[in-house]
Every structure is written in structure tokens, then in C-alpha cells.
Image: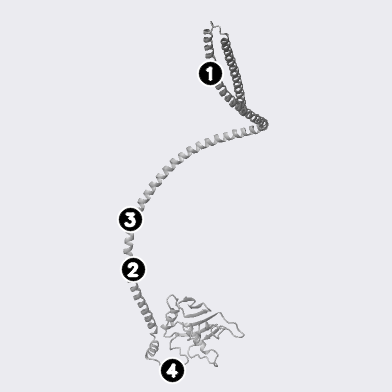
Amino acid sequence: MHITELRLSGFKSFVDPVRLVIDAGLTGVVGPNGCGKSNLLEAVRWAMGATSAKAMRAGDMDDVIFAGASHRPPREHAEVVLVIDTVGIKPPPGIAPADTLEVSRKIKREAGSTYRINGREVRAKDVQLLFADASTGANSPALVRQGQISELIAAKPENRRRVLEEAAGIGGLHARRHEADLKLAGASNNLARLDEVAAEIDAQRQALKRQARLAERYRGLADELRRTEALALHRRWVDAAEQLTMAQTELRSVERDAAEAAERASAARRAVDEAQQLAPPLREEELVASAVLRRLEGERIGVERDLQEAQGAVARAVEALRRLDEDTEREARMRDDATASLQRLDAESADLAGADDAEALGAAKTKADLAEATRAAADGALEALLAAANRAAAAADNAERAMKAADAD
């Protein structure tokens, strides 16, 4: 592999773009310590795919970007381009054949690196395999750095073998073999995982079969349920239609009732208006009736008072009648006694008619006259009591009629 050109921009101390042409034969870079000679080798290794920041003498891969100086601001990205002669080199798959290959690596601060071959973005592994096939690379012993000779002398047999393999040009094969081994190990792991997944899938398949049977049963039940629900809904629809018809009939009836009620309400409003128009005369009549009522109430109170007096008079008359009846009975007895006495006297007078006893006859007549006078007095008292009772009864009748008339008013 022949690197014909090296271009740097923003890499470590090379803040400005630098182009280094490497002609055929021996090309050397000389200069004092600290001028950046080692940075050129690190730039080549970094462009070949170095991944160790320690190998770049940095704590972080972003440290390869120019960090700034007292008179220069820091850069945000760094880029290294290697121009390689393609004689004896097979370009990676997907890269069109050309006389030269431009392999570039660009890093942005806190964004990582990107690789390009002839302007096409590729993977870091593609770049590393490209240089491994050419028996070189970022970690190849072909790139001799400071102290590497002593390391080779003291190296272990495995490291010496790696150096010889790279010198023989089979480093790319070992890299591909290592990658193939990794892929085979990954495939083995994937197969084992596939067996486990297949077992899990078989278990899931059995479970899915049971679920399928349940789903089929559920589908049948669901169809039956849908039919039942459809019948129920149809029945509900029929009932609702009947209820709607009944409701419409009732609505029409209610509307007729409402119309009649509205007519009655209108008539009532008219009657209220008419009543309001008739209210003033009625109020006057009410006032007059109230006055008459108060007057009649006074008369009723007077009549009740007269009635109470008449009832008292009636009670007294009744008592008087009772006494009169007693007196009448007593007078009747006295009259009967007087009549009996008169009859007895008449008999005695008849017996004594032929006698000359004038004195006895006179005494008998005297008794008869006295009895007759007693009887006449009793008859007069009886007539007086009857007249008083008649007057009391008439007064009671008058008071009762007056009270009924007052209640009627």
C-alpha cells in the first residue's frame, strides 16, 4: 500500500489545513521537539480507524480536535484524509474502482466520527478491513512508533506471530476469521435462542389452540347472543312502536283536552274580566249587605234576648199552668165536693121540705151559696190562668218567627 498524500485540518496542533505529499521512495519529516512530528503518525493511525484515545495520547477522542490557543479559538471538528494508490488493492464492496482512494475520518465535538471512502460514507469496520487486507492498520507493527522496537524484542511469541502474519499479508484473513468466529458464535447463540423460542412458540401454539377452541365456542355463543339480542331488540322495538302509537293517541287526546282547557281558561279569563267589571257594584252591595247584616245582627241579638225573656215567660207560664192545673184539679175536687154537698143539701132540703125547721133550711142554703161562690171563683181563676198561658205562647211564637227571619237575612 502506498499512501501518496496526507491532509489534516483541525487535528491536534494542525489547526489550519495542511497537505503533506508523500512521494515514492523515502520521505522524512524533521524538526525540533514539540513541532508535531508524532501528530502526523497519530493522524495516519487515527484515519485508519484507531479507537483508543490513550493511543492518541488523549483522555478522550474529542481531545484530538484543536483545543485553541492564546491567539487562536478552538475548532469544533477535525478531519484527516489519506490518499492511497489503488495498485494491488481491491476497493471495498460498493466502491467504484478508481486510481486512488480517499479515506477520510471526520470528528465533531460531542458528535462522534464518520468515515468516508471516495466521498461515500462507510463503517469503521470497512476502513479497518481495507488496511488489514493491505497488511497494515492502526495497530499494525508496520507503523513503527517510539519505543516499539524494544517492545518487539521483548514481545511474547503470540505478538511476534501477529507481526509475522501481518508481514505475510494474512492479517486481513485473521481479522475476517475472527469476525467469522464471532459471527459463528453469535449464530450458535442465535440457534440456541431459536430453540428456546421454538419451544416457547410451541407452548404458545398449544395455548393458542386452546384459545382457538375457546374462541370458536365464544364465536358460536356470540352469534347466539347476537340473535337473542336481535330478537330482544325487535321485541322492544315492537313494544316501543305500540307504546308510541298509544302515546300518540294519548297525545292527541291530551292536545284536545289542552285545547278545551285553553278555551275554558279563555272563558274563565273573560268571566274574570266581567267579574272585575262587576266587582265595584258588588262591593257596594257587599258594604250595604254588611251594614244590613250588622243591623240584623243587632236585631238578632235583641230578638235572642226577647226570645230568652219569652222563653223565661213561657217557663213561668208553664209553671203557672202547672200550678193552675193543680189549682184546677183542686178546684175541680172542691167543685165536685161542692156539687156533692149541693146534692146532699138538696136531698136534705127535700127531706126537710115538709119540716118547719126554717133554721136548718137557711143553713143549708147558706152552705150551697158558699159552694157556688167558691166554684165561680175557681172558674174565674182558671180562665185567667188560661189567658196568661195563651199570651205567653203567642209571645214565644212571635220571638221564634223573628229569630228565623233574622237567620234568613
Q: Secondary structure at mark 2?
A: helix
148 or 288: nearer the viewer = 288
**Quarter of the image where one finds residue 330:** top right
**Foreground mark, 3 or 1?**
1
Residue 134 in picture, x, y percent from top left:
42, 84
In the image, 250 versus 102, the foreground residue is 250
**Residue that mark 3 sits on:** 217
C-alpha gap between disc 3 and disc 4: 81 Å
Q: Earlier in the sequence, mark 3 or mark 2?
A: 2
Q: Quadrant of residue 183?
A: bottom left
Q: Which residue is mark 1?
A: 333
Residue 70 is situated, as x and y percent measured from the top left of the image, at 61, 86
Sequence order check, earlier mark of 2 and 1 = 2
Residue 248 shows in this picture: yes
Q: Amino acid at mark 4?
A: Ser
Q: Nearer the viewer, mark 4 or mark 1?
A: 1
| Residue at which label 4 appears | 150
Mark 4, secondary structure of its residue = helix
As measured in the structure, the alpha-carbon distance from the residue carrying label 3 to the one carrying label 2 is 25 Å
Residue type at mark 1: give it: Arg
Q: In the image, which disc is placed on residue 200?
A: 2
Q: Is residue 19 left or right of residue 209?
A: right
* Picture residue at 38% right of the left edge, 50% below the top: 226
